[in-house]
Each structure stands twice: as structure tokens, then as C-alpha cells.
Amino acid sequence: MIGCNCNVGLSNTGRPNCVPVFGITSSFIMVPLFANDGTKNGIDLSSALPTWSDLINEADASKRWFPLPAFENVELPKADSQFEEANSGRMVFLRQGKRSFAGELWAEDSTPTLLGKLQGGRCVDFGMYIVDVNGNLIGSQENGFLYPVPVDNPSFDPKFAFATDSTTQKIMLGFDFDRLFDESTMYMITVEEASQDFTKLEGLKDVNLIGLACTTTQASFSAKLDYGTALNKIKYIGATATADWSITNVTQAVTFAPDTVTENPDGTYVLNYAVSGTATAGDVIEVSVAKLGFSGKASDTI
Amino acid sequence: MSDVKVGKHSFRIKTLSSITKEKAVESFSTINRAIVERAWEIANPKKMKIKKGAL
């Protein structure tokens, strides 16, 4: 919300032809407002645009982009502005109403597993890039950067809805944008400018490394995703390249790639680091997923 | 391509190129010897040619 600028009068209202217009809101990309190093997360508009997949696969979660699936039944209502009215009938503007969001994730995008991941968002100061149905990215332009639109994170409220005779399973998400956000700062980066349809971006999948057992020459474990049934989580299969894994000797502060990777049976891995690794008895070894699109790590003491 | 893939096993070419076939068999003793030797030979084609020429 902005007040009056006393240094200018009315603003010029002419406009050129063919100005870009936002499409219907389809989804969002959640981004922490600030990284752990104190920098504000945003897209630098004065240099080459980033490689978008790098932002999703960013190792530092405080700088990472977290795209959400496409929403249904999206509403973005704006509450009424507040005025004080005198007995004479004269009204004085107090503040604009807050902008809220309500939308639904349907079917396979509505698992309780995803609900749990969304609920964590309430505890983080974050903003949203808005993605319209045409795949354009909408944010807040300020000082040469396009920043995510700040969200009033305590208002972030994902709720699970069971399927009924006439409705599918859903996650219903509601939140308010920051009440002080100036909506006149919103600009977009188009699909053509970015060479990226932002509706196609997909967030990282968490991988759980189970039963990690390390020796001085190899690490063995099984790998599963969070999703699946109570008895059978979906196996993380196909990470058979040595570049799909990273190993860190936490004790000696050394990181190295495995020399061999063996997956047998599906989702069960042995990483051998007898040649390139540095490991002695008593060291803490951390195994990390390095494959694009996935995130996970576990540690064990030799 | 930075790996040699033989069956269910992937071997880092950089590693296999830096060690002898005997060292590879010794280091990766949990993997079938024939598989390790095959992977080493794929990763070291020049060393194989020199060896054949010498014979």
C-alpha cells in the first residue's frame, strides 16, 4: 500500500499498443524472500536470465525455487479498502484491503504427502512468483530485480479434503499476500523472453536413503521417495551414473564421487569409493543425491 | 559420457583410466572379476591396443 507522493500531480495515463497482459493464474513458484547469506532472492534483470532448472536444483534450499502444481478453481479476491467516515459523510482513505488466494490441487497433486510439505511453508518468510496459464512468470519489479510477491506466511493454510461421491480428493490452499505489497510493481517475464514455459517447471523430489551402511571402501543403502503406500514407498530407481551421487567425508571435509555404482535389485545401491575416496575407521560419511530433479542425503559412521 | 556401464554396474572412466586392471579387480572385489576387467578394457582402449601390438 502506498500513500500520496506530494511531489507529483496526476500521472500520465497514455499507453502504447500491444502491452502484455497477465493470463489466468495457474500456479505459483515458492521462493524464500532472503537466502541464508542475507541476500534477497530475485531475478537480476540487468544480466542474462538464469538457467531456470538451476534455480530448482539449487543446493542451497534458502535460494531454491519450489514450483507448485497447477491449481483449479483459483480465486484472488481483494478485500474492500478501509475508510473512516465522518458524520458529515466525508470519507478518508485508511488502507487497501488485503489480496487473498484460494485454489485447489486435485487428484494426484493432492496427496497428504504433499500436504505435509506445504504445511512447512508457514514457518518460512517466503514469496510467490505467479505463473499464469500461458506460462508467463509474474513478480514484483524493484531496483532492477524481479522479486517474488511476498506472502503473509502465517496465513498460509493448506487443507486436505477427502473425495466424495461427486468430488475428487483435494488440497485446498488459502493464503494472503503481504498487506503492504504494492500491486503496481507487478511485471512479467514472458515464455518467449525466458525460453521457458514456467508451468512446466517441477519441484525437486525428496529421496530417503534407508539403512545406509558405510565402510572405508563402499556405502550401501536402499533409496525410496516419500510417496507410495504405507507398506511400499516408490523406489528411487535408475540413479546408476557415478555423477548421480556425491559422497562427503564430513570428518575430513573431503567430497568425492563414487568410483562405481551398482543398483541391484531396483532401488538398492552400492557405491564403491575404494580408489577416489578418503575414508578411515571412525569417519562420518555423508551420501547425497546429485541427480537433477531429486534431493536427499544420509550419513553413517564407519 | 563419464561412465562405463556393464550390466548393473557403472564405473567412472576417470577412475579406471588412472589404475591398472589388477588394481581395479582388487579395488572392486565385490563385483564379478570379469565385469571389472571388461569395464577396464572399455575405459582403456589405447592400453589394450599397445598390449596387443607388443604381443
Image (tube, rainbow, N blue to C red):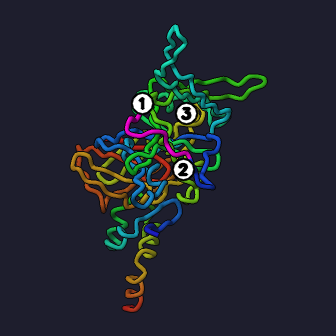
**Dividing the picture into quarters, in which one does residue A4 lie?**
top left
Residue drawn at x 72%, y 29% as measured from the top left: A168
Looking at the picture, tell me which residue is in the foreground, A176 or A22: A22
Residue drawn at x 64%, y 33% as measured from the top left: A74
Q: Is residue B41 magenta?
A: no
Earlier sequence position, callout 1 versus callout 3: 1
- Residue A114 numbered mark, or none: 3
Numbered circles on residues, count: 3
Residue type for callout 1: Gly
What is the chief secondary structure element of the magenta stretch? Answer: loop
What SS does tag 3 mark?
helix
Residue type for callout 2: Ile
Which image quarter holds the C terminus of chain A?
top left
**Dividing the picture into quarters, in which one does residue A152 lie?**
top left
Q: Would you say the residues marked 1 and 3 are in contact, meaning their CB atoms lie under 8 Å apart? A: no
Furthest residue toward right: A166
Residue drawn at x 59%, y 54% as measured from the top left: A16
Q: Residues within 10 Å of mark 3 (few under 14, many from 20)?
A: some
- Residue A237 numbered mark, or none: 2
Q: Would you say the residues marked 3 and 2 are in contact, meaning their CB atoms lie under 8 Å apart? A: no
Earlier sequence position, callout 1 versus callout 2: 1
Q: Position of residue A174 (x, y in %)?
A: 56, 26
Q: Residues within 10 Å of mark 1 (few under 14, many from 20)?
A: few
